[in-house]
Image (spheres, helix red, strand yellow):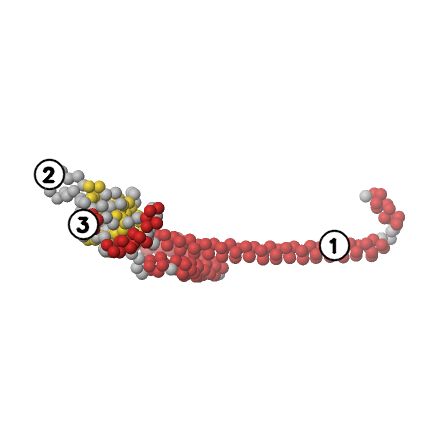
Amino acid sequence: MGLVGLVLMILDPFKIVRNYIFKPIAVFGLAAAEEYKARKEKSVNTTKNVFLKLFIVVLVGFSVVWASIFLYLYFYYSYMPSVLHLKDVHLNIRDCHDSAIDCKPYPFANVALTNHHRFLMVGQPYKIILNLEMPESEHNGKIGMFTVCGTVRDYGNMEVARSCRMSMLHYKSDLLKTILTFVFAPLLIFGYREEKQLVTVELFSNFLDDSNHPATNIDIMIQCRDIQLYSAQLQVVANFTGLRYLMFNWPVLSAVIGITTNLFFILIVCVLSWYHWDDTEWISDIRDRYQQIVQGVSKVATSEPSKALKASKETEPSAKDWLIDEE
C-alpha cells in the first residue's frame, strides 16, 4: 500500500484525477452492477415462484384425480360381488345302510361353497344352476324325466334352503339324429364333436344368503340311479339389479360418471379448504377472544382480594363499636 500511495501522490498530487474521474466511474459502475444483480435476483425469484406454483398445481391436480379414481375403485370392488362362481360336482352313488330310512342310493355330491371366507354377498340375489353333460344314448332317452334336488347348508350343517327341479334330454327324432350324424360325420370321426347334450337345471332363481346362517355347502342329488353323465358343474351367478346392473353392463360409462362425481366433490372440498385457511381473520378473532378471556380471568382474580380487603375494613369499625358499647 505504501508503494501504491507513493505512486498515486507522484502522478496525482492534488487528487483531481481520483476525485473527479476514477471515483465517479467506480460509483457508477458499482451502482449499475448492484442494479443488474437486483434485477437478476428478482427475475430468478419470480421464475422460481412461477415454477413452484405450477408444480403445486400439477401435484394437487394429480393427487385429486388419483384420489377420485381410487375412491371409485374401492367402491366398485367393495360394492360389486363376483359375477360367476364355478364348482365341479363329483357325483357318486350314495352308500345307504340298512338302518337308514330316508337314504336312497342316488347319485349324490356335497359341494363346498366357501374357503374360510364368505362366498356370497348378503342382500344380493343369486342363481344356482347345475349343468349336466349327458350322452345322447338310448338309455338316457328311455329314462325321460328325472329330478335334481339341491340343499343349501350352513356351518352347522343346518338346512338353509332346498329346491327340486325336473329336467330331461332335449327330444330329437330318429330322422333328425340320422341327418345330424351324416352332416357331422367328419367331426364325429376325428373327435371334434360328440353326441352329447348340456342339460341346464336352474335350482334356485333368486337365492339370498342369510347373514345369521351363511351358505357354506350345497348337497346335489339326482333322483335317478341309472342316469348316465359325463360331468357336472355348479354355477352360482349373481343376478344384478339396480345400480349393480348398470355398473356391470356399462362399466366405462359408470366409471366415467363415478370418477367425475368424486372429482367434483373433492375439488369443492379443496377449494373451500383453501379459502378457509387462506383467510386469516378467523385466526385473529380467536386470538382476540383468547386475550379477552385471559384479561377477564385476571380482572376477576385481582378483584377478589380487593373485595376481601374492603370487607375486612368494614367489619373492623363494627367490632370497635361493639367493644365501646360493652365498656
Residue 159 place in picture, x, y as percent: 19, 47
Name the one closer to the observer, 10 or 306.
Answer: 10
Q: Earlier in the sequence, mark 3 or mark 1?
A: 1
Q: Are marks 1 and 2 in contact (CB under 8 Å)?
A: no
Q: Nearer the viewer, mark 3 or mark 1?
A: 3
| Residue under label 2 | 99
Task: State how far apart marks 2 and 3 are (Cα).
Answer: 29 Å
| Nearest to N terminus: mark 1 or mark 2 | 1
Helix, strand or loop under label 3: helix
CB contact under 8 Å: marks 2 and 3: no
The residue depicted at 35 percent of the width and 46 percent of the height is: 190
How would you rate the neighbour count of disc 2 (Cα within 10 Å): few for under 14, some for 14-19, many for 20 or more? few
Of residue 9 and residue 173, the one placed in the foreground of this image is 173
x then y, percent, for residue 228: 22, 46
Residue 126 visible (yes or no):
no
- As drawn, the label of residue 204 is none
Q: CA distance from mark 3 to mark 1?
A: 113 Å
Of the residues shown, which amino acid type is indicated by label 1?
Leu
Amino acid beneath label 3: Ile
In the rendered structure, which disc, 2 or 3, sits on the residue that comes first in sequence?
2
Q: Nearer the viewer, residue 96 or 6?
A: 96
Q: Which mark is residue 143?
A: 3
Q: Secondary structure at mark 1?
A: helix
Extreme residue in the right direction: 10
Q: Amino acid at mark 2?
A: Ser
Expressed as whole percent of the image width and height from the top left, the position of residue 203 reads 23, 52
For label 3, count other residues whose C-alpha is less than 10 Å away and answer few (under 14), some (14-19) or many (20+): some
Q: Secondary structure at mark 2?
A: loop
Residue bearing mark 1: 30
Q: CA distance from mark 1 to mark 2?
A: 117 Å
